[in-house]
Image: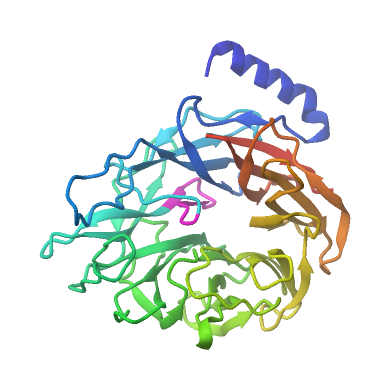
Amino acid sequence: MTTVRRWWIALLGTCLSGTGIAASIGLSPEGQKAAAPDIAVNSKGEMAVLWVDRAPQEKPAGEHNHDRHLAVTDVYVAVSRDGGQSFTTPVKVNASSGAVWGQQVSRPRVVGTPNGTWHISYAANDTHPKLQKTLLTTHYTRSIDGGRSFESPKVLSAITDQDMSGVIHGGFASAAAFGTLVAAPDGSVHVYWIDTRHMQPDSDSGALYGTSSQDDGKTFATEKKLIDTGVCPCCQLTAVATARSEILLGSRRVEKDSFRPATIMTLSRQDKTLVGRQAIGGEPWQIAGCPLKPTVTAVHDNRVFAAVHNGGETTPGVIFSVSTDSGQSFKSHGIVHSSAAVSDAPTIAVNGSKVLLAWHAKVGSAPRRVFYRLFDLSGEAVGDITELDAPPGIAQYPAAAVRPDGNFQLVWQQADRVWATTVSGQ
């Protein structure tokens, strides 16, 4: 970033500071291919924005090459320590160049803990030591110096002798991917992923595995199987923590006759099931394949808010659901953007009095754009659907977090760059 551009951003931030709203800032460098952003805000008010950089991919030679779906992707993080008015120069996270299997439907995740540590998990390419075939494993790394550098990644998922390369799309021998990450108020850090190790050649569902750290990411417990089957194998997991440090985990369930409802389950601090997977509602979606759609979640006291793209609706799109009993049951409030030809990729956050739901959608002949709407804690809409004030062109894949001032920080993919702005939560 040039000195002039930094001065211009700082000036805009000063002019807008009286409203608590910062100007939109392009975070990823021009000329790169940034995608799949994620954002976290820690208790100090610092923000970390993560994205993947898609380097040009070279297809390996060979008619039957199991490496043809290797990712050529890196992960970058930029940090703000002044309320989103400016961000640091992006820092590369992964040690091995081009090793991250990151994309819009399998985003790397970032969370922060109160002592200033930034935690990151992602799926990465590995090679099976015996089979000499590619596989996907779940990796974790952290920064203990405020995002200035990251430790060498740890591999959290075990490598088995399973060979599913003739079945899994992409030719992987096995996969531990489509995962998520969450930090709880008690200081524990939890990583979850979808695992193929129990899949059979005729199976269309995966298992759910996880592990946790009680020492701020320094060490992790041995992985633990939480669900052995019935998990949609390529609908990314999502997770949030309650004030009691329980975990709400979003996933999609595989049911008889190819129905795949979006669900939320509740786990204890020790990753024991407290409430089994509860469907969030909406019209049943029957699909002979993987929807590639995550179920996003936010929580405040005993209220759980969830959103997901549902292809079973008359007009397929994002639906919004609310639970008033800590996730034991949900009421669907239906499609959130009925006038859109298609709406997808929701993100959700709650500041204690308002819920922000954002998504991307196509309206008429316009390109894909990011929209948002505020709701109260009962799930009733507050104000109208609003298009994000973003630069012209395609805007998509938003991610949201709550700032200490009660406003919402929103990041999104704008063409091949990642941008950030603030949305009022008042």
Residue at the spot x=69%, y=65% of the render?
Answer: 316
Model colouring = rainbow
Query: x%, y% of residue 69?
Result: 31, 53
Residue at the spot x=37%, y=36% of the render?
Answer: 55
Q: Quadrant of residue 297?
A: bottom right
- Is 418 left, or right, of 66 in this rendering? right
Query: x%, y% of residue 215?
Result: 39, 60
Residue at the spot x=71%, y=71% of the render?
Answer: 313
Decide: is 239 above or below 228.
above
Q: Which residues are magenta?
A: 105-120
Residue at the spot x=63%, y=37% of the render?
Answer: 420
Query: x%, y% of residue 187?
Result: 50, 61
Q: Quadrant of residue 345?
A: bottom right
Q: Find the residue positioned furthest to the bottom.
A: 256
Magenta span contains residue 111:
yes
Q: Find the residue positioned furthest to the right.
A: 383
Decide: is 47 above or below 313.
above
Magenta span contains residue 268:
no
Query: x%, y% of residue 342?
Result: 69, 56
Q: Find the residue positioned furthest to the left.
A: 130
Q: Work out whether residue 345 can be spotted.
A: yes
Q: Nearer the viewer, residue 169 or 161?
A: 169
Q: Nearer the viewer, residue 42 or 124?
A: 124
